[in-house]
Image: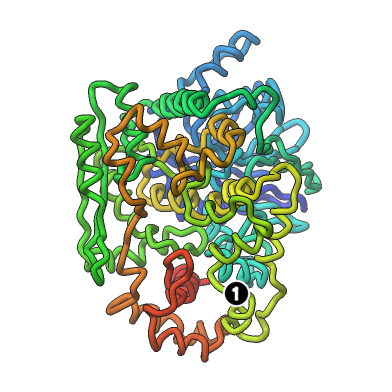
Amino acid sequence: MCGICGEIRFDNHSPDLNFIRHANDIQTPRGPDAEGVFVQNNIAFGHRRLKIMDLSDASQQPLYDPALGLALVFNGAIYNHRELRTELEGRGYTFYSDGDTEVVLKAYHAWGKDCLTRFNGMFALAVWERDSGKTMLARDRLGIKPLYFQHDAKALRFSSFMPALAKASDFNARINPKALNMYLNFHSVTPAPDTIFEGIYKVQPGTWMELDKTGNINTGSYWSLAFGMQPGDETLTADDWRDRLLEALFASVRRRNNAAVEVGVLLSGGVDSSLLVGLLAEVVPDGFQTFSIGFEAVGGEEGDEFHYSDIIANHFSTRHHKIQIASDRMFSALPKAIDAMSEPMVSHDCVAFYLLSQEVSKYCRVVQSGQGADEVFGGYHWYPPLVGAQDPYACYREAFFDRSYEEYKQTVQPRWIAPDYAGEFVKQHFLRPGANDPVDKALRLDMSVMLVDDPVKRVDNMTMSAGLEARVPFLDHELVELAARIPSPLKVRDEGKWILKEAARRVIPSQVIDRPKGYFPVPALKYLRGTILEWVKEALSTQCARERGLFDQAYVDNLLLSPDMHITPLRGSKLWQLGLLELWLQRHNL
């Protein structure tokens, strides 16, 4: 787990090492253990390292192999690197390190772009071919690891952290109207390849980009997710699906225990993280660390789920850490959590994950986390109403979108009013072939888009801000492929995730499974009051906010009159959504 950056020039100029140094510096929290720079011909790669798979200097990056003529920077973890190493050794390759980085480089030499299909893991990488001058960028199947780039006729730059590109001295950061529309409507999700800035893009999950030495770009996809049963699946019973699911999930958890350091679990007290604890207990019977966080209650709304996390920690005899966060500590940490955001994210639990990560990193360097289970197994409230829906798009939009298109036009100043990009994006996604069932249409959208640019990005940004690696077993691509075959009624039955809960009954106590569904609660960010409300007011009234001119003042004033009354369908504050964007831009001096 690391931070990567680079510049490839096409104009016969030398790479800008000031950019590499700046990007490495800003990404230091992602890789606090070491720093490296590689420069040759028209390319420069930078790397910040977090030592997880191999603690020795033999896996230092950027990795250059003069015999193979390849240079690599790589962020992530390849869980099957030992199996790939054995296969490559059978082909005559030799290794001098014990980690996954050298395996990635030699797998590319052996199989070219096809190596991507052999990796089980999370990754963002760039590999340069000395002899051809080509460079390939690629991202894992489910977008767990970030990869941003900026491209013009002179050069291509890339980074794990978007502000490193946006703050480059020669880049003029301009708001992307399409992305602003998506942010305000689609719960702050800006689907790849767009970002909030014109001219900065995200490599799409499951794809590669290849640049030749003149700057021409080819792109391709190496993975897609098909929904619906495969031949022979029709004979499978619910018990069969449950058993296959449990087997696949256990294999995923076991893979993600592959590290040179101890692997713990972020334990919220919900079914998903509790199930991970139970499965990891079978892999590590001598015990491991678990971590839970809680906040002060606000307005009668509870701020922790310690009762349930305690049940699991006691049942499996973990070395459990309960972290209680007072409101004043959350207020002081919020600006730092915003600094850690690669893109603006409104979800309440960003600050929770930030604070949790700061604490966990004192004890542990790798954790497994339960993100993805709701999107993969149908756990959200908007899935059951889609069963048999005649207009799945309308049903989904009503449950998920933060505001109607008419309200969006009232939210922004006239020059930012754009077509209904968010609505059209979802509508076209639902019309794509390969998912016929209405629930499957929503699951496919959420797995391939919403999950990538909300929960997964949030976990990556917040954990990596503390030099903590988070692994997400529910997003193992083999598990996800299996889940996409499971009939949707087995997922959405009984308020959702029925088949996952049935599998969990084989592993964890029933009182955690049959409890009311919760979420990572941070009440103070739902009900904007006191210090946070003042921050939002100030951010929206600064001179730079007025000059930027994003939001209609009458709309803002109406929200300020009664912040608690303006809540999105996903229980978020509309005022916080506006204030967070301004706070993020101002914190990053953009």
The residue drawn where x is 59% and y is 47% is 443
The residue drawn where x is 36% and y is 54% is 519
Does residue 388 sit above or below 287 in this rendering?
A: below
Image location of residue 135, percent across then percent down: 71, 39
The residue drawn where x is 55% and y is 56% is 385
Q: Residues within 10 Å of mark 1 (few under 14, many from 20)?
A: some
Compared across the picture, whether 57 is left or right of 221 comes to left
Between 496 and 537, the residue placed more toward the observer is 496
Residue 401 is at least partly visible in this image: yes
Compared across the picture, whether 64 is left or right of 28 comes to right
Between 327 and 484, the residue placed more toward the observer is 484
The image quadrant that residue 541 belongs to is bottom left
Image location of residue 432, percent across then percent down: 75, 49
Residue 58 is at least partly visible in this image: no
**Which amino acid type is marked by label 1?**
Ser
Compared across the picture, whether 440 is left or right of 220 comes to left
Between 164 and 468, the residue placed more toward the observer is 468
Image location of residue 499, percent across then percent down: 47, 35
Image location of residue 477, percent across then percent down: 57, 33
The residue at which mark 1 appears reads as: 404
Does residue 119 sit above or below 527 in this rendering?
A: above
The residue drawn where x is 69% and y is 40% is 208
Does residue 132 sit above or below 200 in this rendering?
A: above
Which structural element holds mark 1?
loop
Does residue 7 sit above or below 570 in this rendering?
A: above
